[in-house]
Amino acid sequence: MIRFDAPRAVRFCDGFRRRDFLHVGSLAFFGLTLPDWFRLKAQGAVTGGRDKSCILLFLVGGPSQHDTFDPKPEAPAEIRGPFKAIKTKADGILLSEVLPLTAQQADKFSILRSVYHTAAAIHETGHQMMQTGRLFQGGVEHPHMGSVYARLRGSQGDMPPHVMLPTAIGNTGVAVSHGESAGYLGKTYDPFVLNADPSAENFEVPDMLPPGYLAAARVDRRRSLLRQMDEVVRYFDSSEDARLFDSSFQQAYTLMSSAAARRAFRLADEPEPGRRRYGMNRFGQSCLLARRLVEAGVRFVTVNMFDTVFNEITWDSHGSKPFSPISGYKDTVGPMFDNAYSTLLGDLHSRGLLDSTLVVAMGEFGRTPKINPAGGRDHWPGVWSILFAGGGVVGGRVVGSSDEIGAQPKDRPTTPAEVVATVYHALGVPLDTELPGLQGRPTRVVDHGVEPVLELF
């Protein structure tokens, strides 16, 4: 994170020393560079009125369709699994018993039960395709949906256009990209990555300076140091980032001292009962923070439910260590999702924000139809379910279906590219929109022939 008050000094290659008020532990402040972010702000056209926003809840690990959103109560026990199906607020829609609060919000969301892909059954292929619409090949990294939206819409006020909470995805087995960056669009459009646990006691974002921090004397001192940075820039004039840094710094300083930004990240302002309804855990408090950020003008928020699938209870329910037992769905991950998702939808609805905020809850694949010998379920991209709410989506509806054992699509098979196209459609992005691609070749936001799932609207 970028800080203005780090205690150590920095020595540059020429021996130049100064207090590290620009201490860069990582550039995860934005997931992008300061000058790039302000170049984005200058380039981005901010439209009038309230544009639609998106909250993407990425359920890292791959939830079992049978044990969440597509129960099979009539199937044999080895297919059905250990959990009962329950009725919901929407007639005819059943969910797993691990999601009782979500069931009471079923009139606000629709379930797409026929998503599938045919690539390798590893987490990373699903991460790439579900967040960009494409599988990465030949070293080409395609941009995350939030980065595309940032490129097309720019920022609103002092807030970055795309925020990722609470951190980026880490180790899930294979050391390849998870599809979370701006890819070939460049760092300008990378997300701001929080890299902090919003459920931690006394949580705050270090880069968002508290009220009263900027006493006049300290501002003058930092402006003086800024002038000295001119000397440093000479040594890096071959770097575009460094050349732009000096001219952009004052704007960065304004952002980090922004009262609106401070308020958006200040979870302590939330009434305690409301915070607890989301769940006092990383995912729950990240969902609450996502709601606050959308209110403050952030266009796209990605919430990663987990950053790994190893040695903690996640959706990756193989049944034996270092993975999770399927009992974790009822004891841990089910309640964690249930509290946060149901409260998020209720809050957005009560605040009049649900119509303008698309909420997508999805994992990277489903789980095997049959319980394995360890009592869990393995990776299965053959079919799975995701949830759409808000942003023009009609609630209380099921679109598509899986077969009787939840192994393959039965009706309305839907690819990851079509899921991404659906998000763009809901956000008002024409699917023939072209981006500046590799080597100057324009690239469409989705491939030719890919269509959104219009049955959701």
Image: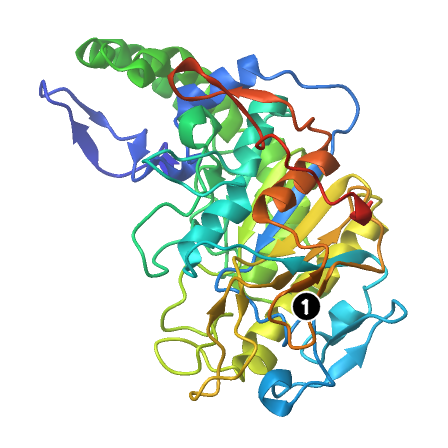
Q: Quadrant of residue 43?
A: top right
Residue 347, percent across and down? 77, 54
Task: Say above or below: 182 vs 40.
Answer: below
Q: Amino acid at mark 1?
A: Asn
Task: Say above or below: 291 vs 183.
Answer: below
Q: Residue at x 65, y 38 (%)?
A: 421
Quarter containing the N terminus: top left
Mark 1 surroundings: few (<14), some (14-19) or many (≥20) residues within 10 A: many
Residue 274 in view in this figure: no
Residue 418, percent across and down? 64, 43
Residue 315 in view in this figure: yes
Residue 42, percent across and down? 54, 13
Task: Say above or below: 323 vs 157.
Answer: below
Q: Residue at x 52, y 26 (%)?
A: 255
Q: Nearer the viewer, residue 336 or 420?
A: 420
Residue 407, percent across and down? 60, 71
Looking at the image, how many numbered discs can be counted on the residues? 1
Q: Nearer the viewer, residue 256 or 236?
A: 236
Secondary structure under the numbered disc 1 in the rendered image: helix
Figure coloring: rainbow
Q: Residue at x 30, y 34 (%)?
A: 24
Quarter containing the C terminus: top right
Could you tell whether 272 is left or right of 129 in the image? right
Q: Nearer the viewer, residue 244 or 390?
A: 390
Could you tell whether 117 is left or right of 172 in the image? right
Could you tell whether 169 is left or right of 115 in the image? left
Q: Nearer the viewer, residue 80 or 251?
A: 80
Q: Residue at x 48, y 34 (%)?
A: 143
Q: What residue is disc 1 on?
A: 339
Q: Quadrant of residue 274?
A: bottom right
